[in-house]
Amino acid sequence: MKQVIGAVALVVPDYDRAIAFYTQKLRFDLIEDTHLSDSKRWVLVAPKGSAETRLLLALADSDDQRATIGKQAGGRVFLFLETDDFDRDHQAMLDKGVQFLEEPRKEAYGKVAVFQDPFGNKWDLIERV
């Protein structure tokens, strides 16, 4: 038996701003952008080369949902972007204006630095050893 996590929902304030950040700043692929109604879309993005897990960009449509934007992990790092070349991707992200919250550091599991998307979600950029 094989199972995978196909998508993780990420609550965002605006579809187009989120698509722009993930595709232009992080260089993710836009996998799907299907209009479901006047106010709802099915938007999937994924890192280049990712075959399974995607982010479902979910538009907040209530006060409760808007309150969770950037806080889905309670202030902790929420998502982990693994790379085969930390230095290449770190520099490319800096060049695109991605906000890193710390300098790169070496840990037992690899090289890592925390960055934040424009909605407040914290991410780890990691090159595993």
Image (tube, grey):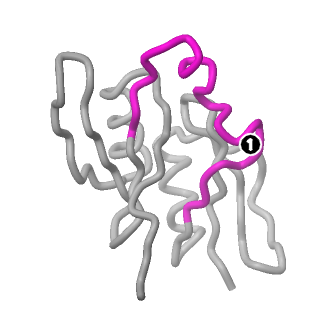
Q: Does the magenta stretch include residue 58?
A: yes
Q: Position of residue 52 (x, y in %)?
A: 37, 70
In the image, what residue occupies the spot 59% across and 17% down?
Answer: 64
Q: Position of residue 117 (x, y in %)?
A: 56, 37
* Relative side of 34 to 26, left or right: left
Residue furthest out toward the front: 1
Q: Position of residue 97 (x, y in %)?
A: 52, 38
Q: Where is residue 32 in the image (x, y as percent from the top left)?
A: 21, 48
When the figure is inspected, residue 33 is found, relative to residue 84, above or below; the finding is above
In the image, what residue occupies the spot 64% across and 67% down?
Answer: 126
On the image, which quarter does residue 125 sit in? bottom right
When the figure is inspected, residue 73 is found, relative to residue 12, above or below; the finding is below
Q: Does the magenta stretch include residue 76?
A: yes
**In what quadrant of the picture does the N terminus appear?**
bottom left
Helix, strand or loop at mark 1: loop
* Relative side of 75 to 93, left or right: right
Count residues near mark 1 (Cα–Cα under 10 Å), then give few for <14, some for 14-19, many for 20+: few
Q: Nearer the viewer, residue 109 or 90?
A: 109
Q: Which of 4 and 56 is in front in this view?
A: 4
Give amino acid for label 1: Leu
Q: How many marks?
A: 1
- Give the extent of the magenta segment: 57-81
* Disc 1 target residue: 101
In the image, what residue occupies the spot 17% across and 23% down?
Answer: 37
When the figure is inspected, residue 63 is found, relative to residue 96, above or below; the finding is above
Q: Which of 45 and 95 is in front in this view?
A: 45
